[in-house]
Amino acid sequence: MKMSFRWFGPNDPITLADIRQVPKTRQIVGMLTDIPVGDVWPLTEIKQLRDQINAYGFELKVIESVNIHDAIKTGAPTRDRYIENYIQTIRNLAKVGVTVICYNFMPIFDWIRTDLNYPLTDGSQSMRFDLSKLPRDPQVLFNRIKASDNNLMLPGWEPERLAQLKQLFKSYENVSESDLVANLKYFLKAIIPVCEEVGIQMAIHPDDPPMSLFGLPRIYKNLSDMKRIAALVDSPYNGFTICTGSLGENTANDVPAIIREFVPTGRVPFVHLRNIKHIAPNVFQESAHESSEGSLDMYAIMQALHDSDFNGYARSDHGRNIWGENGRPGYGLYDRAMGISYLNGLWEAIQKKANN
Ligand SMILES: [Mn+2]
């Protein structure tokens, strides 16, 4: 397991010098934040990013995310142009040594929470989802999210794109779940041969939360969805990100079992490790990583990864805002760093026990 840390580039209040002090973490999960969704990522900018990251002794092997234009997801006539752009971005990323691209195929919103700075009883703040608090009008949710982003760009909530929210929703009006699957297949059929050629594994991220909201279709919610996606293009380059939090948000999902079934297939190059606490049906909040703090058994999850010989990239996922840090919701420094130490501790113990 190669532990990594997600970094949002030079505008991230967390610096590479900060991250360098997190033990046993030598990978940066990077992205370019200033490229409009659908445009080609220029090679010069990618090289610049890699050089910045290398200068601090980190590797850049994983990109999260290269987001997918809605024309591809809706199957609009313009999609081929955006797929061509995506292929060029894949080629450019391969040139600097990237081997994994995390992406998602969620309509309009990358992820949804109803509260980004929910006060926990210990004085920290975390993200929370409560279905009963979801406004009927997505614009109201967007305004609420914008108002609580601590003035930091939130991935997947780009104001330029979401300014056209009504129009975006209209473009999905006739897109059913099976249409969305067919559109994913069309996209994968076009890009996976290039991925095979240049050695980049695609890793789709689960829907977050794994349920339909605002009437939008969702296609990566559970194990059977994974089997369906895997069969669309039968190639190890058509891979998955297993996000323990996103999948764990549905209590019916057995996350260690999903790991045990899918990691041995070689289709999982990237894992997001976080805990969530179920409060009531359709109400959860993001907790500290420790098993005792949430509803997921992180020890069982790490054991499942170990037993499946997981050798890919992992990162601690969303943390709380603690110790007065006013960071990007989910992406502060302190709690993610503590999460890494905990996860590395579990991993070391599991490894030593197995080798005895
Ligand atoms: Mn995730």
Image: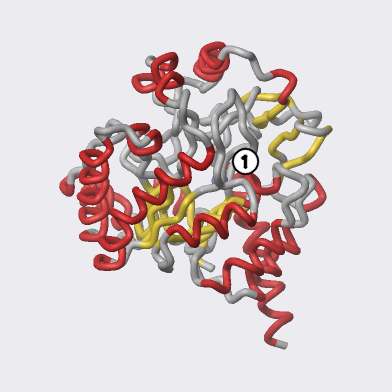
Q: Is residue 187 above or below residue 256?
A: above
Q: Residue at x 70, y 74 (%)?
A: 350
Asked whether mark 1 and ligand 1 are closer than 8 Å, the reply comes as: no
Instruction: Name the residue nearer the viewer: 77 or 245.
Output: 77
Q: Residue at x 26, y 53 (%)?
A: 90
Q: Which residue extends farthest left?
A: 44
| Mark 1 surroundings: few (<14), some (14-19) or many (≥20) residues within 10 A | many
Snapshot colouring: secondary structure
Q: Position of residue 196 (x, y in %)?
A: 30, 67
315 left or right, relative to 83? right
Instruction: Name the residue nearer the viewer: 292 or 345.
Output: 292
Instruction: Name the residue nearer the viewer: 139 or 307.
Output: 139
In the image, what residue type sits under mark 1? Gly
Q: Position of residue 226 (x, y in %)?
A: 57, 56
Q: Which residue is mark 1?
A: 319
Q: Is residue 302 above or below residue 177?
A: below
